[in-house]
Amino acid sequence: MVVDSADAVVEGTLAWSFLTADDLTELAGLREAIDYFDDPVEPRELDTMARDFQRDSKLDGYLATVGRDKGGTIIAYAWIHPAVSSNLSGHLYLETGVHPAARHRQIGRRLIEWAVHRAQDWHDAKGEGAPPLWLGYLVDEKFTGLCAALVREGFVPQRWYFDAHARFGDHPLPPVPDIPGVRLVHYDASLSEPVRLAHNAVFGVLPGASEFSRADWEWSLGETGDRPEWSWVALPQDGDMVLGYAMNTAYVGEGPEGESEGWTARFGVRQAWRMRGIGTALILASMHSFRDAGLDGAGLGVDTGVPEATGRLLDRCGFESQERVVLYARGGAGTM
């Protein structure tokens, strides 16, 4: 795709140009000001921005623009990140930011419009046979203005991500429920491949996601393979297909007061087996394992498309949730 300098222009009050490596330090300074004011769940820092710039520059579809005020200072930007996986060649993630002092001038809304249009131009240049264009934007749920701007541009919330924690001294730990037709077993290495298949069935089919290969899956397990007795798998009473799983590890002495926490790194239940209490059983079995091992509490990272139902499940188990990040998405097969 041929890119002209005029394509970097977002609106008329700032001087716009495409992002270069020389801009990264100043852009990181802008992000620091934005993050100090907004207090996001995931701040942006220079090292990760430099890494992303190097990665994106090597991928087809790199585009980012920065806007400078009359003094030449960068006060706004938009960044389009192409997906790294070759299986997601039509997927782009958007990122925008405006200095707090320059807000309420509609620059943020125009940045989203610009990013959507530039992404569409990039996709059109691919020609016939290109995968459908899909755009994603990860945003803190508390940023209601940005969420509303995304909705105006045709984005819809699809996934919610957040961490939840429970301390064992705060609430009685409920017993692990019995699920008719289902048995819970400790994870072992022989279950790695069946759990991978279950994980791909749960998460690999989602928009913006890709399936784990065997090699990538084994690498991703990391510390969860060190203490298999803390991890649990749900199987049919008379079968061996994995219905659900909770892959666990622990972080010892890393809490604010040196406490230890069992951590559920991967958790899922196959669609056809939901609403039967399997998820609750897996979480509670994990919590009992953590407590029996002498840990102070439990935590897990949540990835869900039904935050209300997930919240009720966590409440039943005594978890408290932190701030949520939402994936807003637009496009995909037949929708853009």
Image (cartoon, helix red, strand yellow):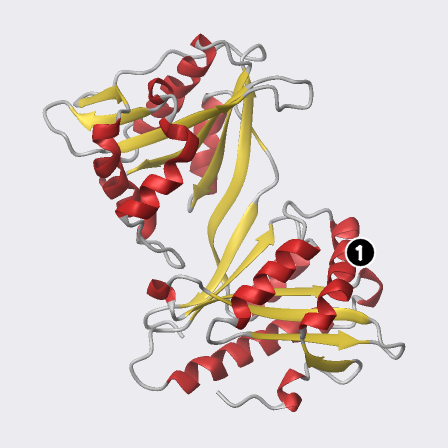
- Image point (57%, 43%), residue name: 324
Instruction: Decide: is 140 above or below 109.
Output: above
Instruction: Decide: is 222 above or below 253.
Output: below
User: Which x, y percent locates residue 224?
Assistant: 39, 29
User: Which x, y percent locates residue 110?
Assistant: 67, 75
Quarter of the image where the C terminus is located: bottom left
Q: Residue furthest left?
A: 238
Residue 170 falls in image quadrant:
top right
Instruction: Decide: is 201 above or below 253.
Output: below
Identify residue type, mark 1: Ala
What residue would you read off at disc 1?
A: 33
User: Which x, y percent locates residue 125?
Assistant: 43, 86
Tell whether 102 sits left or right of 276.
right
User: Which x, y percent locates residue 290?
Assistant: 45, 16
Query: Is residue 322 in view?
Result: yes
Viewer-closest of 184 and 319: 184
| Label 1 Cα neighbours within 10 Å, binned few <14 / some 14-19 / many ≥20 | some
- Image point (82%, 68%), residue name: 102
Viewer-closest of 174 and 225: 225
SS at badge 1: helix
- Image point (80%, 82%), residue name: 13
Query: Is residue 94 in view?
Result: no
Q: Residue furthest right?
A: 71
Tell whether 238 sits left or right of 210.
left
- Image point (36%, 65%), residue name: 86
Tell whether 183 sits left or right of 136.
left
Residue 237 falls in image quadrant:
top left
